Every structure is written in structure tokens, then in C-alpha cells.
Image (cartoon, rainbow, N blue to C red):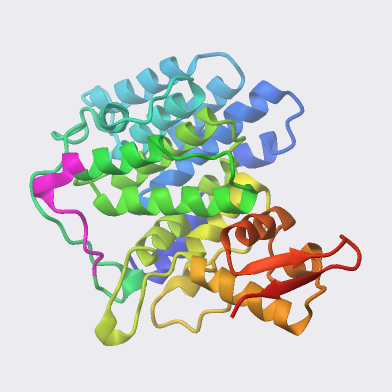
Amino acid sequence: MSLKNYIFVATRYDMDLNSKYQNEPEPQKKQRYINWQAAKGLQAVDGIQTSAYLDEVAEKNIEGAISSYEASKLIDSYYDVKQDREADDSYEEADKVAARINILISEGGFSLSTEELKSIHKRLFDGIFDFAGEFRKNNIMKHEWVLDGDTVVYGNAYNLEDAVEGALRAERMTQFRQMDQEDLVYHFASFTANLWRIHPFGEGNTRTTAVFLIKYLRSVGFDVDNSLFEHHSRYFRDALVRANYNNLKKGVYEERDYLDIFFSDLIAGTHHTFSSRQLHILAQQPAVKKRLQPHEWEEQIKLIIKENPSVSREEMAKRLNTSVKTIERHLKQISSIHYSGSAKTGEWKVDE
């Protein structure tokens, strides 16, 4: 997709519904509106867009005149009964899938399992793809604008079941108790990037991953900001691409920081400016916050202590742009750092 087309798709969703419901005071209407906007916005990850007819149906659901399931049936029948009218089939996939996404992110129930992932794909693409709900049988390449025409190396088609189950099994065993908000952001960004790279479905993988992610985050208590998928779903996909791409010959390496800031806005309430132009491998990219690796935390903390042995935990956190809780956790993990004396007059010591 060209940059020109990307900009068109990314701004396609500034519709009449926006002006009508953006400041809606009734919580249920507001949430239905947000869900629809996210469902429509997610179609941009595959360069497709929804129709004006979908807006008409969505408004009926937002107003409470019809249920989400009735809205989806209206959309399906609109395209399935073609002999009585002239239908623009270019909108069919986007409209049907958007209506189904709206249902999925509106309802409860979730399990962190391979069966759940397959079920979401099946429900989104049944009647659209012959392979809805089935893992792909062949290896694939997808030439990406953001990679200057190159492709990510996706999971091998011969062990997709094992790869997906392995990723989900590891996630089910994750202990969140010791994680602060910053750690959670990086954790969920990494989990999503790894699951997406396996790319178990031939088509519709990113939309399926996004719905799976929204439902997973809600199941563990996050109030997910769906408006990000309304306005920045293409950035979300491009960030996933960059998080999984290496080309050592060209000096291009996996870059997960762009995905991290998306997740920071998604679950931590921060506010960043997103542009896919920044993600192109040939672009002059502005600095983004880097995630320190374990050994880098130790090196940076030791440097700060050597500069000022009486430095406080609060000052360390400020210097490293993180939380005091994160600093305290790393200090406990570094056996060569000790603190002696009182809280006010004590000093840090580093074993050489």
C-alpha cells in the first residue's frame, strides 16, 4: 500500500457518527459508539474500508433500536441478497467483519487458549474465507511498505499449533504480581508481537490478534482504550511488523519501542503521537524511549551510585525515567549492590 493510500485509510473514519456521539453523555451509548469505531478502524490494517450503509446500521445499534447481533445479520443479508439491488462488493468484507468485531468486543467470556484464537478467526471470517478458523497450511510472505518491500519471516506452517500453544502456555504461567505498570506495558507488547509473528492464519491475522488482545486485556482487568484502534490501527500493524523484522545486512534490527508506546497509550493512559512514516526502515526516526535490558539496568544503576553513593531511589527513578518500584525491584536482583547506614545518612556500595 502506498503512503498516499495509507493516509486516506487512516482518516477515512471521521464520519458523521463522530460529531453525533463523541460527547455522548449516556455511558452505554458512548461505549457502543466506541466499539463500532474501533471495529471499523481495524479494517485499515488490511487497507479496506466500511460503507455508509454500515454507519446507518451502527447508529441503530448505538441508539438501542437493534442488538449487535441483529446489526450483524442486517449487514450479512445486505450482501447475501444481491438480486434485488446493485451492491458495491468492495465494502463487503470490511462491513461484515466490522459488525462481527463489534459483537466480539462487546460480549464477555474469554480463555487464553488456541481454541479461543481459532474461534475468533472463525467468527470474524466465516463465509468470507474458506479457511476461517483454520491455521494456514503453507508458508507465506507479505511485502511491506514499511520494510521497503521486504517481508517479516513468519512462523513455519508445519509447526503452527505447537508455536501458538507454546506462546499461550508461557503466557498462562506469567506471574504479574511483581510487575508495575511499566513492566505490564512491555510484557503485553512483547506477548502480542510474538503471537502475531507466528501468523497462524493466512489472512485476517492482525484483526484476529487485535480482538484476542482486547478481550485478553479486559479479562485481566484493563479498561482498554479502543479509540486507538479507531484512529491508529494501521500504525499498530506497522509497529508489529517493525517489532519482528531483522535484516543484518542492511543494519536493521527488531524495533519494539514503537509498539511499546502504542501499548502505553492502550493500557496506561499515556498520550503519544503516532505516524507510520516514523516506522519506515529508511526514515529518519525520532528518538523513542528505550526498554533497558536486564544487564543494562545493572550497568546504569551502578554508574549512578558511583557518581553519588548517597543517591536516593527517587533520584535513580528520575534519572532512568522509570518508577521507584521498578528501581527497588532491580536493586533486589543485583547482588553486588548493598546499602548501609540509616535512610537519611546511609550510602550505597558496589562490590567490584
Q: Position of residue 316 (x, y in %)?
A: 74, 69
Residue 337 falls left or right of residue 90: right
Identify whether 47 is placed above or below 341.
above
Specify the quadrant that holds the C terminus. bottom right
Q: Residue at x 48, y 59 (%)?
A: 259
53 part of magenta stretch: no
Residue 154 falls left or right of residue 234: left
**Residue 42 in which image quadrant:** top left
Identify whether 195 is placed above or below 71.
below
Q: Position of residue 47 (x, y in %)?
A: 35, 54
Between 117 and 40, the residue placed more toward the observer is 117
Range of the magenta residues? 151-162
Residue 156 falls left or right of residue 94: left
Residue 57 falls left or right of residue 246: right
Q: Position of residue 187 (x, y in %)?
A: 49, 50
Q: Residue at x 68, y 56 (%)?
A: 328
